[in-house]
Image (cartoon, rainbow, N blue to C red):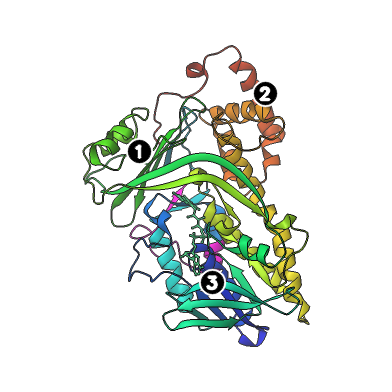
Amino acid sequence: MSSSARRRYGHAVVIGSSMAGLVNARVLADHFEKVTVLERDERPAGPEPRKGAPQGQHVHLLLEAGKRVLEELFPGLTRETQGSGMNVIDSSRDMAWQHFGVWKVRVPSGIESVLCTRPYLEWSVFQRVKALPQVEIRENVTVEALCTDAEKTRITGVKVKGPGGEETLEADLLVDASGRGSRSPRWLEELGYGRPEEEKIGIDLAYTSRLYKRPAGFQDDWKLLVQYPRAPEGWRAGFISHVEGDRWIVSVNGYFGDHAPTDDKGFLEFARSLPRPGLYDYIQDAEPLTAPVTHKIPTSRWLHYERLPRFPERLIVTGDAVCAFNPIFGQGMTTASLGAKLLGELLTGKEPHTPGDLNRASEQFRRKLPGIIRVPWFMTSVMDMHYPQATGTRPPGVGILHWFFGRLIELTSVDANVYHQFLRVLHMRDGLESLLQPGMALPLLAYGAKSLFVPLAERANVHRMPQA
Ligand SMILES: Cc1cc2nc3c(=O)[nH]c(=O)nc-3n(C[C@H](O)[C@H](O)[C@H](O)COP(=O)(O)OP(=O)(O)OC[C@H]3O[C@@H](n4cnc5c(N)ncnc54)[C@H](O)[C@@H]3O)c2cc1C
């Protein structure tokens, strides 16, 4: 939308200027005369990590569905800096991926992902949002409380604390994109709405990461190397991602308290414990540029706002504030972007508009967001539940699911069609039901039968790291 004549609402306030906050601000700028984004942090001058987004020091991949939304909202974002900034890669051809003990095939898939550091992506989006005339981004401002009408049925603004002291900001719509530490559960409880039900899977995971100079003359043909363990026997993983500045970001992680050390020797030893050939062989002689840093992820957590019997009008909770995934499948930024797209669709509606529209949009948003979260949540939680140490409620039939996904993943090492469909689901192009269509079910059944008689190393690619 370009004409301000079509902006039909007054003032929207967004809490948090990380990925979810920024993409939502961009969407709201099409519908509101003014959008104020409130950020607790002071931003670094360039694409550097910051305190309020500590995950920025660890490997990040943007899935295809997220890339599409970002390209719709910010045309040219991912292509303009191809090579020097963002790397748009083919998710199969350019990625060497050992998963569940097997190396996946590498053929062109036409499914694209984006590689760069998380601060670079956020900074690129930030520059574009900041340039929008409707948007004001205020740093060093912490949202402390919600304001409501006298009946406490509608959110009317926020109380904030900033460099100039305390102040109240009025808002026609409030978007909480303040991440995992969001105070919305507590605020809602204090207002008498109760706390949202929390679905939690305990994984005690930690990422430890550092940047390396990409070795001059590096000959291998992958841009992203990923090694995931075969559950439940293994729980260590590693990534090397080709990022801007001719650097590699290298992350290693371990579940259930088995976290990589942050000293040089310990970091390398942890990397050496991953299957070889693999990550260690690439970094053993490479030049580190930063010291290893650790980020802990005790749980995957989904707050079910849609299940609350009552909810205040004009409040949107989104991004990690609703669902913070185990990041192994890289779904957080994409889910946040799809959430922003949903909000845009709900605000678009048909003319003429009434004041009740914003009430309806916020109510529909909390009811519809789970439709976006469900598949990525299912994918990671099924994987995590493979470990007996993982805490949380196991869905009925989880053993059958593990058998199904185990064979499916093994098959991605020898059957390009099956891998392609798996990627389409992972990148949120298709739903889970697509894994059951005949083109998938028949090879899976045949492979499943084979798995009863033929050892893993003879039926799947266990040892050979494939070339594209
Ligand atoms: C180790 C790791 C690896 C990951 N890898 C991937 C990946 O490969 N791909 C992917 O898509 N996702 C990945 N993620 C997830 C991804 O980082 C998040 O899903 C994504 O950044 C969206 O987060 P968000 O904007 O909702 O919240 P956050 O990034 O947590 O941002 C919240 C913002 O709100 C601000 N804030 C908080 N409280 C207040 C307040 N009261 N007032 C004002 N401001 C406030 C904070 O300062 C911060 O800027 C990973 C996460 C981790 C931890």
Tell me, yes or no, if residue 223 can be seen here: no
Find the distance from the CA under tag 2 to the CA under tag 3.
55 Å
CB within 8 Å, label 2 to label 3: no
| Residue holding disc 3 | 144
Circle 2 SS class? helix
Query: Residue 135 placed where, x, y %?
Result: 52, 80
Residue type at mark 3: give it: Glu
Q: Position of residue 41 (x, y in %)?
A: 41, 69
Left or right: 446 as drawn, with respect to 90? right
Residue 144: image location, x then y, percent:
54, 71
Q: Which quadrant holds residue 284?
A: top left
The earlier-in-sequence mark between 2 and 3 is 3
Residue 355 visible in the picture: yes
Residue type, mark 1 in image: Ala
Say which mark, if any, is on residue 445. 2
Residues rendered magenta in the picture:
69-91
Packing grade of label 2 (10 A; few <14, some 14-19, many >=20) is some
SS label for mark 3: strand
Pick the front one: 188 or 98: 188
The amino acid at mark 2 is Leu
Task: Name the N-terminal-most of marks 2 and 1.
Answer: 1
151 or 101, which is in the foreground?
151
Rendered position, 426 above or below 3: above
Q: Please state which of residues 12 and 188 is positioned toward the viewer in this rendering.
A: 188
Left or right of residue 111: residue 79: left
